[in-house]
Amino acid sequence: MTTTPPPATASTASTSRELGRFVLAGVAGLVVDVAVLYLVLALGGGHYSGRVLSFLCAVFATWQINRHFTFSGAATDSLWRQWWHYLGAMLGGGAVNYGAYSIAIFHLRDYALGPMLAVAIGSLTGMALNFASAKWLIFKRR
């Protein structure tokens, strides 16, 4: 006898859609992150300090995408206030992200694609925490 799963609720469908869009925003953020990091490296910057700058640029890019595309119907504060709340919320996932990046870059720094792979590893490790922070702290529906 087979059973069919219960239908998805509107909330579950909405969360799934938001998660998919959040992942797409994350991919765009990853591109910004990698591009800025390689620019910093090309200009003589370091792997660790360059990553701080590239992370901040990626957070700004994902904030713009998430506020317009992922969570567009959510009630929001002023842009300035929302930016600082978003940055603060992303710092938890950013700490996890930077820790994973640091471990990965230590092992991969001598490879041409090492920094890109290390950024990707860091981004994946912080993504779940960042989604929860964005959905339930920054873009929560009132």
Image: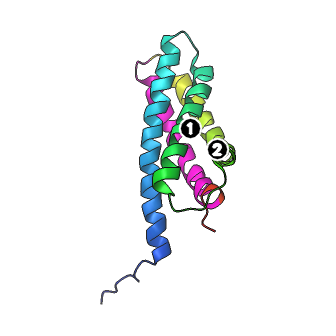
Q: Residue at x 66, y 42 (%)?
A: 91
Residue 31's image quarter?
Answer: top left
In the image, residue 74 lies in the stretch drawn in magenta:
no
Amino acid type for the residue under numbered disc 2: Trp
- Outermost residue, top direction? 44
Where does residue 113 sit, x and y in percent of width and height? 40, 23
Amino acid type for the residue under numbered disc 1: Phe
For the N terminus, the quadrant is bottom left
Q: Residue at x 48, y 46 (%)?
A: 65
Q: Give the secondary structure at mark 1.
A: helix
User: Residue under circle 2?
Assistant: 83
Q: How are the colours assigned in the image?
A: rainbow
Residue 56's image quarter?
Answer: top right
Where does residue 19 sit, x and y in percent of width and height? 47, 58
Where does residue 87 sit, x and y in percent of width and height? 65, 42
Q: Nearer the viewer, residue 66 or 107?
A: 66
In the image, residue 116 lies in the stretch drawn in magenta:
yes
Query: Residues in magenta?
Result: 111-136
Viewer can see residue 108: no
Query: Do the CB atoms of the residues marked 2 and 1 lie less than 8 Å apart?
Result: yes
Where does residue 102 sit, x and y in percent of width and height? 59, 29
User: Residue under circle 1?
Assistant: 60
